[in-house]
Image (cartoon, rainbow, N blue to C red):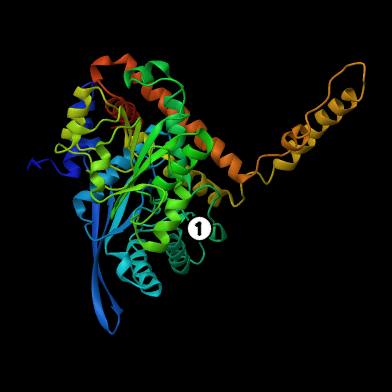
Amino acid sequence: MLDIKEPGFRENVDLMFRRAVAHLDLPPGLARKIQICNSTYTVRFGVRLRGKIETFVGYRAVHSEHMEPVKGGIRYAPEVDQNEVEALAALMTYKCALVETPFGGSKGGLCIDPRQYEEHELEQVTRRFAYELAKRDLIHPAQNVPAPDMGTSEREMAWIADQYARMNTTDINSRACVTGKPLNAGGIKGRVEATGRGVQFALREFFRHPDDMKKAGLSGTLAGKRVIVQGLGNVGYHAAKFLREEDDARIIGIIERDGALMNPDGMDPDQVRAWIGQHGGVKGYQGGEFVEDGRKLLEAECDILIPAALEGVINATNAERIRAPLIIEAANGPVTAKADDILREKGTVIIPDLYANAGGVTVSYFEWVKNLSHIRFGRMQRRNEEAHALLLVSELERLSADKELGWELKPDFKKRYLQGADELQLVRSGLDDTMRMAYQNISEEWHRRPEAGDLRTAAFIVAIERVAASYRAKGL
């Protein structure tokens, strides 16, 4: 393998920002204001665990406050550092602008390997981290709203929400201090699946644009398309599951920590995930051929490659050998800047992370609105919709009883038509609409500025223009 020095994750984000700004007529001072991270708080705190005090290091970066609150996940990983959270906070700014959620960008991280701790120990650490952030308003419904990220889940968000409520006993909106919570703690249906579902909706919208498909050398629909997924965590699992079950795509490859599985006839993500849960990896699963060096499967022939785990998995050392004509970035920053250049030269189309994994923050926005309004979606209108539908169905049934007309209702029509939208259906509808409109804006920019070259640059252009407009409206 060639030893090629590449920029770090933060430098990659800055390179892509500068590439987009080169196509815009922004004053240098405003461009600089948008690019830089406003502030980063570093906290070091001790927790007594297993009879001794352990010291932990955490971060919360605020990239842009052109809109407030700022929004972004908290990740738990041993390799978390300031540069990473600042890069991720910048991506959150552009991502929120792209899908038109009214947030600035933020990100948090804690240097910890959650697999090394018991649940009650993680709760102690999480609550203390939340305390350190909340007392500085770095967790607050109106100022800074975290969410789950790599290494965290709705469990940690419930702990954070409870800790904030204990510190702010009179704040009626305390549940809105964090999103991605369990349903019984103020969460919203569809949040767990949201990022993976957003990947599915993004691919569906791409396949509605024949000119864009032609650039990738693809045609037809998602049905039968060969898909390789890198990382079967929450995002990769849900994306693979929905693409297989609802769009009839074939999941021919699954890459995990201990290796990869390959089956040209396709695999069931549910079965593979269950196997991983029981055995800790994919090795030994009988439904596919085991490949010990899972990274090799990134280079296998397929129609769609979905990197859904870590940053930089597609880089200058393997980009030339990537054979997928279409890559959709379900993870943050899985393609480095140098790899991006190589793939563009090859004609590979990349649906960028900036857009592709925005499903999570979109549904987090819905959850935040739900918490502030103190009512679940659908509660006010669902039965009213059903009552209006019943009027129409009753009249249709009366007419279908007339034998002279010679027509009748299908057996399941009444049941389907009379069902008013519940919270999950409304969330999915809102997410679908958001992903459709965002892609249409990106695609339009892509075709309007052929010199921009790719979807990533087009997405950055759309996002940066919106952030710039917000700053101008503030008088900057």
Image side of residue 145 versus residue 90, left or right:
right
Q: How many marks?
A: 1
| Residue 178 visible from this viewpoint | no
In the image, is residue 175 above or below residue 349? below
Local packing at callout 1 (Cα closer than 10 Å; few below 14, some 14-19, many 20+) is: many
Mark 1 residue type: Arg
Please provide percent x and percent y for residue 215: 32, 18
Residue for badge 1: 175
Q: Nearer the viewer, residue 236 or 15?
A: 236
Where 427 sits versus 58, above or below? above
* Residue at position x 24%, y 38% in the image: 335
Residue 166, given in percent of the width and then of the height, sits at 46, 69
Front residue (pair 56, 296):
296
Residue 341 image-quadrant placement: top left
Label 1 SS? helix
Of 11 and 32, which appears nearest the observer?
Answer: 11
The percent position of residue 293, horizontal first and vertical second, equals: 23, 49
Q: Residue at 38% x, 49% y: name it.
A: 232
Q: Residue at x 40, y 74 (%)?
A: 120
